[in-house]
Image (cartoon, helix red, strand yellow):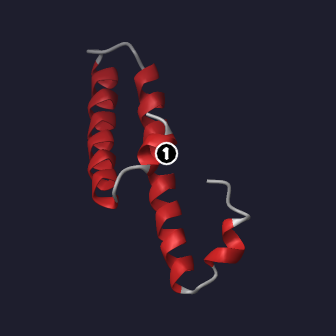
Amino acid sequence: MKAINYRKKTAKELRTDLDSKQGELATIRFDVKTGKDKNSAGIIKIKKDIARIKTVINENSYMKDMAKSDKIDNTKKDLKL
């Protein structure tokens, strides 16, 4: 899934997706190590999805912090979200 789609989700949904992807990653790693699955490319895709989700979570927390300190107007121009 693309980051644009993750940005539309709430924080709770993002946490749920993150937990789900981390579980998938553990399962695929186990299957590859035990020889049940030969496709290790799935690991890379899931790791990228996890990174996207974590990035969106961090962006959201950064924007909330900036909104609290009233500096959002100055930094919003710098961020290309």
The residue carrying pointer 1 sits among few (fewer than 14), some (14 to 19) or many (20 or more) residues within 10 Å by Cα, namely some
Is residue 41 shown left or right of residue 36?
Answer: right
- Compared with residue 9, is residue 41 higher up or lower down, i.e. above or below? above
- Compared with residue 20, is residue 63 higher up or lower down, i.e. above or below? below
Residue drawn at x 51%, y 84% is 68
The number of callouts visible is 1
Q: Judge by depth and name the residue closer to the eye, 1 or 46.
A: 1
Residue drawn at x 34%, y 22% is 32
Task: Find residue 75 and report its horizontal and vertical position in percent.
Answer: 69, 71
Q: Which residue in the rendered view is the most extreme toward the front?
A: 73
Is residue 65 shown left or right of residue 20?
Answer: right
Q: Judge by depth and name the residue closer to the eye, 38 or 17.
A: 17
Asked which quadrant contains residue 25, the reply is top left
Give amino acid for label 1.
Arg
Is residue 5 shown left or right of residue 79?
Answer: left
Task: Find residue 5 and report its horizontal and vertical position in percent.
Answer: 44, 41
Mark 1 lies on residue: 52
Residue drawn at x 68%, y 61% is 79
- Compared with residue 79, is residue 37 higher up or lower down, i.e. above or below? above
SS type, badge 1: helix
Asked which quadrant contains residue 20, the reply is top left
The quarter in which the N terminus is drawn is top left
Residue drawn at x 73%, y 64% is 78
Q: Which residue in the rendered view is the most extreme toward the bottom?
A: 69
Task: Find residue 7 and report its horizontal and vertical position in percent.
Answer: 45, 50
Task: Find residue 49 and report its horizontal and vertical position in percent.
Answer: 44, 38
